[in-house]
Amino acid sequence: MALEYERDTVSAPIELMNFETRHVPGALKLSQEMAWPYRREDWEFAATVGQGLVLERAGEVIGTALWWNYGQAYATAGMIIVTASAQGGGYGSRLFNGLLEATDGRDVLLNSTEEGLTLYKRRGFTAWGTVLQHQGPLTAAVPPNIRDDIRPATDSDVASIQAFDERATGMPRSSMVAALADSGNVVVIERVGRVVGYAIARRFGRGYVVGPCAAESVQDARLLILAQLAKLHGQFVRVDVYAEHGLGDWLESVGLERVGYATAMLKGQRPVSDWPARMYALANQSFG
């Protein structure tokens, strides 16, 4: 009887539908199959601030693809997974084509593993950079911040942080930034009464992630990241940074090893930041 049930399940039609809360347990199972460190809470957060599609077969989630809307012009995509037993059947293409249709003509950014590059290139995506993943137990003691211009953020800073984030990314991400700030600890750099940088640390995956971090210089980005690391001694910490800014070697020096990388890709026009504001560390590789 078990074998007959398995055959029935495998032969059942595969449906493409909108991602709903009920799909979170199945999505979590998929990411565990891929050895991705997402928690149930991470899937719930991603689905709450974004939207997406699933492939479902006989009530089982066999594929996911999520995206996040940043205004009328931009979106990011991620958490794109197809279970191993369904790979090679064109389901990844079906899922991703549905996602591109859902983004409604926006310019789309994503960070690709090596396995995904062929699919994305076929859909018109081009590479523009590299994201380095650094992580590990933070065993080195980081001295606490004693600078007058770096302080914990308050509720009254949220609008300024949102505005600075838009300068740094070139995209209107107010809802995302508010949700990230609400879920984590935020520090800002304030000079002459203006917020000129911020960094968020929050629970994610195996421990904590430091990101996003936006600033007007690499030096300020380091100061903001250090301000967060000083509070995370003994914790497992992850920081994803753009290779072009040269923060990778520095992160290694504070004990966060490089464990992987992703290729930053886009379909359409890359958003233009308002120099000197730049994004240095990502909230995660899906949100951008």
Image (cartoon, grey):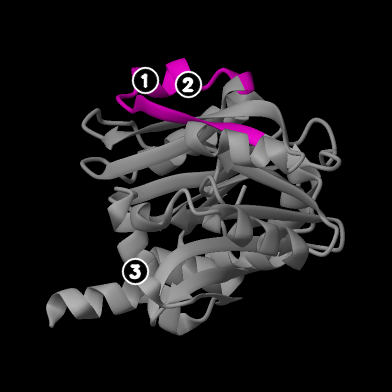
Residue topped by disc 2 = 248
Looking at the image, is mark 2 or mark 3 nearer the viewer?
3
Q: Residue at x 62, y 66 (%)?
A: 178
Sequence-first tag of 2 and 3: 3
Q: Looking at the image, which is closer to me, 85 or 242? A: 85
Judge whether residue 39 can be spotted in this image: no
Residue 46 vertical placement versus 279 (above, below) = below
Residue 254 in the magenta stretch? The answer is yes
* Residue holding disc 1: 252
Q: Amino acid at mark 3?
A: Arg
Report which quarter residue 204 is drawn in. Answer: bottom left
Image quarter in which the N terminus is found: bottom left
Q: Is residue 203 positioned above or below 213 on the image?
A: below
Element class at badge 2: helix
Q: Is residue 72 left or right of residue 64?
A: right
SS for tag 3?
helix
Q: Is residue 193 magenta?
A: no
- The residue indicated by pointer 3 is 40
Q: Earlier in the sequence, mark 1 or mark 3?
A: 3
- The answer, for residue 144, to whether it is visible in the render is yes
Front residue of 285 and 145: 285
